[in-house]
């Protein structure tokens, strides 16, 4: 038996199915990630088909049946379609990267309301020009890693426990963690972390303002976070959205 369910969701992907339908992947507030079919969505008269586009924040009603791989959407109302993101390539690049992380690295039907709220917040901030998209994405990436269980520790050297690591040459061993200028000499270095990069990572993690004359440190931070995630999840091949928007 099916239950009629209403929930908020972000649309991750949408694809044609058959002659008239579409299949969507949603990340929802109450049911995590799931896939659903919209029958008749390809008709020009379909209001659901127009509302359920990637990046849109919607309220969706669907017939939920646990034994069914594809749920059936009966209605969808638009909450926010983030117009400014869709009109700006740089904003779109980082927003698509967020959808890609959700699509590829979250578990089907695993509920995480904190992550859902974080996604809505970061898309709203990108849409509103509160900070540069690269910085906002970096903030989200560190938050996302924490929600996956791979929180980045930057507070002290992972070997000797030394704190106050600012203004020194550091490195990161993906098995051990951050290494101070002394401990880095006797351990394998996977990634060199210069003071500007370390400062940027700390600001991203702690939601502090970043004063940058260029985007080099923020982009380097994202490169580091990609490699960090690749180490912990070998199947992760990097963020493909970045290649599309080159």
Image: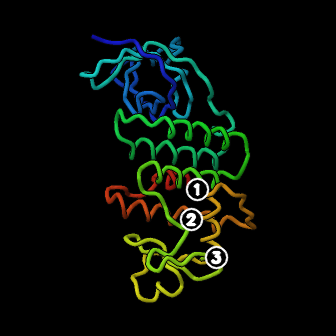
- Which quadrant: the N terminus? top left
Q: Nearer the viewer, mark 1 or mark 3?
A: 3
Report which quarter residue 118 is drawn in.
top right
| Whether residue 9 is situated above or below residue 21 in the rendered picture | below
User: What residue would you read off at disc 2?
Assistant: 221
| Secondary structure at numbered mark 1 | helix
Contact, mark 1 vs mark 2 (Cβ under 8 Å): yes
Expressed as whole percent of the image width and height from the top left, the position of residue 244 reads 50, 51
Count of marks, rendered view: 3
Residue at 49%, 49% in the rendered image: 144
In x, y percent, where is residue 190? 42, 76
Task: Compute the Cα span from label 3 to label 2.
Answer: 16 Å
Image point 62% across, 39% down: which residue?
Answer: 121
The residues bearing labels 1 and 3 have C-alpha atoms spaced at a distance of 20 Å
Q: Secondary structure at mark 3?
A: loop
Q: Residues within 10 Å of mark 1 (few under 14, many from 20)?
A: many
* Whether residue 87 is situated above or below residue 240 in the rendered picture: above
Using residue 58 as the reference point, say whether residue 214 is left or right of it. right
Expressed as whole percent of the image width and height from the top left, the position of residue 165 reads 60, 77
Camera-side residue of 114 and 69: 114
Query: Along the line of sight, which residue is nearer the eye, 146 or 161?
Result: 161
Residue at image point 59% right, 21% down: 78
For the residues marked 1 and 2, what is the alpha-carbon distance in whole angstroms? 7 Å
Badge nearest the viewer, 3 or 2: 3
Q: Which residue is mark 3?
A: 166
Give x and y (percent) for residue 84: 69, 37
The residue where tag 1 is placed is: 138
Task: Look at 58% across and 36% down and name the residue there.
Answer: 120
Q: Residues within 10 Å of mark 2 (few under 14, many from 20)?
A: many
Q: Is residue 142 above or below residue 45?
A: below
> Going from the N terminus, do you reach mark 3 or mark 2 first?
3
Q: Residues within 10 Å of mark 3 (few under 14, many from 20)?
A: some
């Amino acid at each position: 038996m099916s239950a009629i369910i209403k929930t908020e969701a972000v649309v991750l992907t949408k694809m044609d199915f058959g002659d008239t339908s579409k299949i969507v992947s949603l990340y929802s507030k109450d049911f995590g990630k799931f896939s659903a079919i919209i029958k008749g969505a390809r008709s020009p008269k379909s209001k659901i088909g127009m509302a359920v586009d990637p990046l849109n924040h919607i309220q969706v009603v669907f017939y939920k049946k646990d034994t069914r791989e594809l749920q059936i959407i009966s209605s969808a109302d638009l909450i926010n379609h983030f117009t400014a993101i869709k009109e700006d390539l740089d904003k779109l690049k980082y927003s698509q990267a967020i959808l890609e992380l959700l699509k590829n690295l979250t578990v089907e039907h695993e509920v995480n309301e904190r992550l859902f709220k974080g996604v809505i917040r970061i898309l709203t901030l990108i849409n509103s020009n509160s900070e540069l998209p690269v910085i906002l994405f970096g903030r989200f990436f560190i938050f996302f890693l924490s929600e996956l269980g791979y929180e980045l520790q930057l507070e002290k050297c992972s070997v000797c426990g030394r704190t106050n690591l600012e203004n020194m040459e550091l490195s990161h061993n993906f098995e051990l963690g951050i290494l101070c200028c002394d401990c880095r000499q006797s351990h394998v270095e996977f990634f060199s972390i210069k003071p500007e990069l370390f400062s940027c990572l700390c600001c991203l993690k702690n939601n502090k303002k970043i004063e940058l004359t260029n985007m080099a440190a923020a982009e380097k931070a994202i490169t580091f976070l990609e490699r960090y995630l690749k180490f912990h999840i070998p199947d992760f091949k990097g963020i493909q959205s970045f290649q599309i928007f080159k």
